[in-house]
Amino acid sequence: MGMSASRTGKKSRLMSLSFLTIMILLSALSIGSLEFVARVHAPTTSANPLIAINNASNSTSNSFIDLAHTSSQFNMIVNVTNGPSISGFAVEVKYNPNVLSATSIDDSAGVLTLAAQAQGQVVTRPDDCYDGQGPACSANPDNGPGTASLTAITPANTTSRTTGQLFTISFTVKDQSSAFSQMQINSAKSALSEWNGTATIVLDSSNGLRTVDGYYTSLDCPRGSGVPCVPPRPAFRVMTKTPSKKAQTVFNASASLPSPGASITDYHWNWIPQANTFGYVDTFTNSTAVVEFPIAGRFLMTLKVTDSNGIFWSVTQPVDVVDTTVDIGISEITVRPVNKHVLPGTTLIISATVTNYSFMKENVSLLIRVENKILNQTDYPRALPSQGELSLTAKWDTAGYTPKVYRVDAYAPPLTNSTNGKIIETNVDNNLAFIWVQVVSPTPIGFQLGLWPTLGLGIVSLGAVAYSIARVRRRALPSDLL
């Protein structure tokens, strides 16, 4: 009985571990970054783990060459070198669907599968798809023509230091005339997982995982030379020290090289953030691109270089964009009670709220005033977290105020540098919001006060107050009083 309970508990723990590992690796496929795992950014060296695509008939080559146009099918192997003791992997391969079609993925001879079988463990494959077909295509939103992807998971580490085959992809050549296709390992969505006894550690491009792409060619360069075309070599750097939201970020690809004897004819840039929205810019023969990212987060920037041989090659790397917004603003101002006209001596309750729209905590002050007379203010700056709010209430006794129109302000002084006093806010348009209040003389019996006779006293009345319950940034003269 005790033995059975022990085995049940162990099985439960392994199932829980397997589920956690699956979720972590699937998150890599869906958003391009593994948010559940703390990363240690490490320099990439030749000793780092490597995932590469190699010719199944020649493991030292990353290409399949068919200048004779005689091969309608071929196999490529996805290999790992210098990997840790792994419990799983996720690999996504992209290729030109006009040239190639993947017909199967086979990991039966892979190092993970063989090790799992030797230890009596089950391999789970939540993502197993090629050209939109296969036993498991729904996990990865990229699945479709031109994509082959496999995620394989075991309950615990099954390999020792890992070097060997992960899986084989079988391809059919759709265009046997002179053609070329990259087989790109999507480095932003490929990873190895390792169980360290307490947590799943993911190795990806952010912490040293290297990738080497493969390619197919039935094209010679120059034409008729009998020399197989080799791909251009795109490369780019982020020239902006700190890429920021809604600010210009400069990329430079001048280090890119065309294939031998060719010249680069086009630089095409595209990027996908975590929200999976898409942006692109084509700079033609200009190797510099200027991009404004709409939101903060990790973007996957891909540069595709095309050369005069008609060959294109892509490289992808992550770009971390930060939010440097410094902004506080009045988000609400209200007046109670809401009456059409205010007689002298009426006490009004003014309420205002300031919101911290900055990406970090800020020290915020708030005041309420009528014609530069401060009715109430915070006694010292309050520390507000990002998106935090600070509210303030003031009483305005209108006794003794001359009948006319008054402007009631809610004001948050702009944020300044504590050393030199200079304003550091990136937006000061919303630091002031106001409403209009009209103090009117008592109306004699039988006499109704209209607005035009009050123009000598001022324009606009407490009709503006009818609008004051809504959230405002700035208030104009209310149209119902014009």
Image (spheres, rainbow, N blue to C red):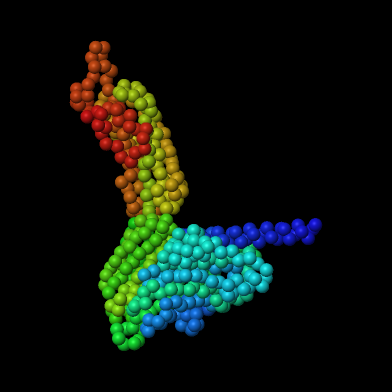
**In this picture, residue 131 sits left or right of residue 259:** right
Q: Residue furthest top?
A: 446
Along the viewing direction, whichever of 456 and 137 lies nearer the viewer: 137
> What residue do we see at 42% from left, 56% from top?
275
Q: Is residue 227 above or below residue 321?
A: below
Residue 263 position in % (x across, y down): 28, 79
Q: Is residue 190 visible?
A: no
> What residue do we see at 58% from left, 62% from top?
21
Residue 464 position in % (x across, y down): 30, 30
Residue 425 position in % (x across, y down): 35, 51
Along the viewing direction, whichever of 307 and 210 lies nearer the viewer: 307
Q: Is residue 299 above or below residue 252?
A: above
Quadrant showing the N terminus: bottom right
> What residue do we see at 29% from left, 84% from top?
223
Along the viewing direction, whichever of 455 and 174 lies nearer the viewer: 174
Q: Is residue 367 above or below residue 149?
A: above
Q: Which quarter of the figure has residue 219?
A: bottom left
Quadrant showing the C terminus: top left
Residue 390 position in % (x across, y down): 43, 41
